[in-house]
Amino acid sequence: MIVYTLKCQNEHAFEGWFASSTAFDDQAATGKLVCPMCSSTTIIKAPMAPAVAGTKKGALQADELKKMRQFMTGMRKYVEKNADYVGKEFPEEARKIHYGEADPRHIYGETTLEEATELVEEGIDIAALPPDLDEEAN
C-alpha cells in the first residue's frame, strides 16, 4: 500500500491509500477520487518531503541501545546480588519452591528451553535473565 497526501482544487488536503502509483493515476483519470470536504473531483498528489536518512536517527538509535544495555546489565546485577545461584539445579529448585518443598527465595540458574517450557506449563513463574553483555564483549 502507498499513502499519498492529496489535494483538491480548493486546497483541501487529505490522505489516500492506493495499491500502487498506477492505481492513483487510474482513479484520478476516471474522476473516482473525491475530496471529502467539498466533493471536488480534481485531485492531485500534494508535494511530500522525502525521507532522508540523517545522523539524528542514528544517534537516537545508539542512545536507545545504550539505555537498553544499561538496563539489562543493571537487571542482571540486581538478580545476581539478590538471588541464590543454583546452577543446573534450577528446574528442580524452582519446582521445590513452587510446591512448598523448600523455603521461598529468589533463585537463578541454568535450564534448557525444554525444561523452561515444562516449568511454565506447570504454572511456575520464570523469566530469562538477560545475557552478561560485558562477558560477551570479551
Image (cartoon, helix red, strand yellow):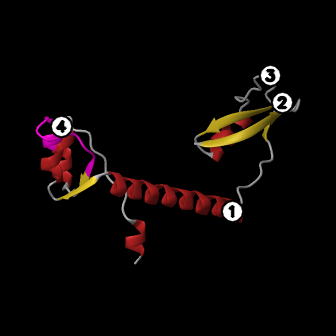
What residue sits 63% from the left and 36% below the top? 17
Measure the C-alpha gap from mark 2 to mark 3. 7 Å
Measure the C-alpha gap from mark 1 to mark 4. 51 Å
Tell me if residue 60 comes above or below residue 102 in the rendering: below
Horizontally, is 40 left or right of 121 in the view? right
Q: Nearer the viewer, mark 3 or mark 1?
A: 1
Q: Residue furthest front?
A: 103
Q: Residue furthest right?
A: 10
**Secondary structure beneath disc 3?**
loop
The label shown at residue 53 is: 1
Tell me if residue 21 comes above or below residue 53 in the rendering: above
Horizontally, is 104 left or right of 46 in the view? left
Measure the C-alpha gap from mark 3 to mark 4. 63 Å
Q: Nearer the viewer, mark 2 or mark 1?
A: 1
Horizontally, is 11 left or right of 126 in the view? right
| Residue 32 image offset from top left, x and y in percent | 70, 28
Label 2 or label 1, whichever comes before in sequence order: 2
Label 3 or label 4, whichever comes before in sequence order: 3
Quadrant of the frame with the N terminus = top right
**Secondary structure beneath disc 4?**
helix
Q: Nearer the viewer, residue 66 or 106?
A: 106
| Residue 50 image offset from top left, x and y in percent | 74, 55
Label 1 or label 4, whichever comes before in sequence order: 1
Residue wearing tag 3: 37
Mark 1 Cα shell of 10 Å, populated few (<14), some (14-19), many (≥20): few
Residue wearing tag 4: 98
Residue wearing tag 2: 12
> Looking at the picture, which amino acid does disc 4 mark?
His
The residue range painted magenta reads 95-107
Label 2 or label 3, whichever comes before in sequence order: 2
